[in-house]
């Protein structure tokens, strides 16, 4: 019974900081050192390139010519839509309609992708399983494996 009781010294009272010089703990700086950002609540270490308010080196250096920054690259590519179509889905549609010549208009007609208003579509056909019918692709880009599969089945690819 007595051994289950807690010792009166096992819990230490927390320091009550910031309660004046007479409290004996902290005083007016409350254990945070002097003044400045580190003494304030919510202070976080600045980023690695922070130079104490001086203009960062990354901002002082001149920018390179050409489209190299992410902002300008985004600006030039924001009207491009990248579309991926699986080779097996194209094969299924061609077998249904018995037409083995495929271009971008046929893909839209078959409902395999829907072009977005005011965007240029870059369509790429990816391999997912071997093709059994000779397909003929014109004006479309295919992955390396998809090309091999189409040529092996007797089809052709012209870009």
Image (spheres, helix red, strand yellow):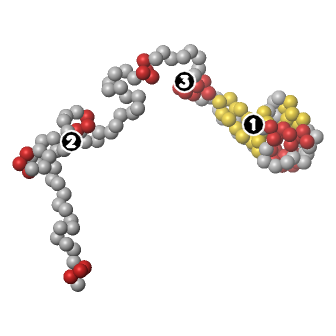
Task: Pick whichever, 151 or 31, lies toward us.
Answer: 31
Element assignment for label 3: loop
The residue lying toward the viewer, choosing from 15 and 127, is 15
Query: Given this view, does label 1 or label 2 mark the residue nearer the observer?
Result: 2
SS at mark 2 in the image: loop
Residue 124 disc label:
1
Work out whether mark 1 precedes mark 3 in sequence or the reverse, and give the earlier one. Answer: 3
User: Residue 44, position in %: x, y?
Assistant: 33, 39
x and y percentages locating residue 53 in the rendered image: 32, 24
Asked if residue 4 lies left or right of residue 127, the reply is left
Can you name the residue that lies furthest to the right here?
154
The quarter of the rendered structure image containing the N terminus is bottom left
Q: Residue furthest left?
A: 22
Is residue 32 shown to the viewer in this render? yes
Q: Position of residue 144 (x, y in %)?
A: 80, 37
**Whether residue 23 is situated above or below residue 149 in the rendered picture:** below
Q: Nearer the viewer, mark 3 or mark 2?
A: 2
Q: Residue at x 57, y 22 (%)?
A: 68
Residue 69's label in the rendered image is 3
Image disc number at residue 32: 2
């Amino acid at each position: 019974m007595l051994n289950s009781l807690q010792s009166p010294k096992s819990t230490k009272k927390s320091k009550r900081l910031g309660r004046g010089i007479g409290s004996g703990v902290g005083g007016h700086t409350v254990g945070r050192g002097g003044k400045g950002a580190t003494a304030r609540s919510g202070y976080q270490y600045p980023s690695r390139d922070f130079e104490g308010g001086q203009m960062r080196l990354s901002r002082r250096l001149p920018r390179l010519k050409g489209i190299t920054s992410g902002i300008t690259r985004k600006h030039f590519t924001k009207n491009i839509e990248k579309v991926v179509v699986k080779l097996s889905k194209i094969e299924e549609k061609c077998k249904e309609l018995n037409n083995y010549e495929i271009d971008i208009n046929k893909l839209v007609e078959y409902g395999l992708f829907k072009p977005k208003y005011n965007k240029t579509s870059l369509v790429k056909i990816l391999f997912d399983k071997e093709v059994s019918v000779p397909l003929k692709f014109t004006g479309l880009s295919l992955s390396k494996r998809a090309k091999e599969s189409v040529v092996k089945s007797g089809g052709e690819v012209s870009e």
